[in-house]
Amino acid sequence: MDKREKRKLTKEQKVARKAERERKYRRAKTWQMSLYPIGGFGHNAFMFLMGIVAYYATGIVGLGTVIASFIITGSRVLDGITDPLIGLIIDKTKGKYGKVRPTILIAYILMSSSTLLLFFTNHLIPESFGIIYFILLYAIFIFGYTCSQVGLQIGNNIITNDPEQRPVFGILTMIYTMLFYTIATIYLSMYLTGKYGGYSEIGLFHEMTIFTVVLAGVAYGLGILAIASKDRIENFGAGKNTVPLKLKDLWPILKGNRPLQMYIVAATTDKLSLQIHGNQIVNVMFFGIVIGNYALMGTTQAIAMIPNILVLIFGMRYAMKFGSKKGYVGATWSCLITYGLLFLLLWLGDPTQIRMDNFGFMTIAFLLLFLVGGAVRYVASGLSMPMLMDVIDYNTYKTERYAPGVISAVYSFIDKSVSSLQQTFVGLVLAFIGFKSVFPDVDTPYSDKIFWTTMFLSIGIMMLAWTASLIAMKFYKLDKERMAEIEQEIEARRNEITEKDKSAVTN
């Protein structure tokens, strides 16, 4: 057999294998896989915008740093209490337009209207009502954020149940996320702050808000288009055979689902640490004060694009072969090692030598560690998403109840309750070292106190979170082989009810 025949045989085998998976699983088309994650641009755009709301609240509206931090935290925790109820409502929704599309549309309307009002009018409100107005609009935003998060996660579950496709879907989402944050970071750190001279000018917030609303509208529209053909009752769990969900089922879902519990431990600790690491105030301290060059943040984001995509593709292929869990664990170990070395570099070396016009040891080592660390961090986050989809299907397999909204909302509630602490945590830590009225800015002088606080907020918290994640994964049993068994059993139940319906019609 010559090489041409071998290649032909391999191609035929691939076609046969794909046909077999089409029969066993509910797979997504290539264009759907590529287009639906773009909806995440909208979600990320609004969250990126609200990452600078503390600067607006303190510098423009006039709220104190601690007061602003507590308001942001309180609004998120209060809304988080309603998350499971929102999820229950969505799970009971079986209308003409499905579950995902109405939820995403409502989310966009709430977030766009609340942010436009907040950044364009809050500073015009009389001081006696300014705090109440801020709290109200922020609460509306968080409610929209919940709908967006739950809606997008339900779509992730509906669009495919193939254990090999889900890691691809998760990694594509992270590639798009990386592209968005690269564009947004450059836009904010290199264009807007340069144009307006920092966060003290209202024009910066106005321009950033308009950019966000327009980008999010396009992104959500593309996501709705991609999910349209899948957003139907026959794709919800075991189809018509799914047992209806009741309010009393909420607690048993969490109590009796060990994979969900372990996933929540891993995902929420990761999320909290990454939000603290990505907090704009922490970024100002890291790049603007410790390194002394805030524009370098945008430069590194631009440089990171290609290596990040290459590492994400490698992580995707690894997870396709060995499963989401194994890929997540491997990426988490890589994060621990890389960021540990980055801390040692900044501690033992001179961060001020890190310059794009000075390619010495510090610059090369920093870029290498920062870029690799960021890339494997994206891999870990990307593989977290398909793990939640696996948890949802495990619940359907175990209880015959399809509850993507409730499970996503339960996770969202705990996630928000924990991650909402990030702004308060940052605010309290900075108040402890003396920043009680304003946050550190690019003009704040360097000190050892600033250095150690920055290392703790930017690197130390993440390393603690990754350690907790690795411990949780010891008790998370949904590996690739187990998920293949679960998906085939769910598909068999769906086919069984379909055959019964056909027999009833024939008879």
Image (cartoon, helix red, strand yellow):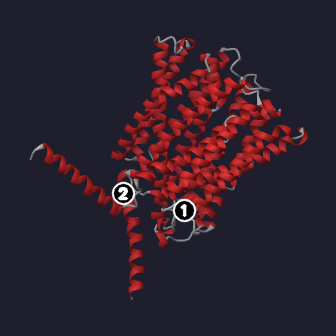
Q: Amino acid at mark 1?
A: Ala
Task: Answer with left or right where residue 220 lies relative to residue 175.
Answer: right
Q: Is residue 322 above or below residue 64?
A: below
Using the rendered view, name the quadrant where residue 484 is placed: bottom left
Residue that appears at 59% across and 31% down: 185
Q: Residues within 10 Å of mark 1 (few under 14, many from 20)?
A: many
Residue in front for this viewpoint, 222 or 471: 222
Report if the CB atoms under discs 2 and 1 are less than 8 Å apart.
no
Question: How many numbered circles are shown?
Answer: 2
Residue 27 coordinates in the image, percent (x, y): 40, 58
* Spot occupied by residue 230 in the image (x, y as percentages of width and height): 48, 62
Query: Badge 2 is on which residue?
Result: 484
At a point 89% along the width and 38% down the height, the residue shown is: 127
In the rendered image, the quadrant that contains the C terminus is bottom left
Residue furthest bottom in the image = 507
Label 1 sits on residue: 403
Q: Is residue 336 or residue 98 the one in the foreground?
A: 98
Compared to residue 155, the image places residue 501 above or below, namely below
Looking at the image, the residue that sits furthest to the left is: 1
Residue occupying image coordinates x 18% and y 50%? 8
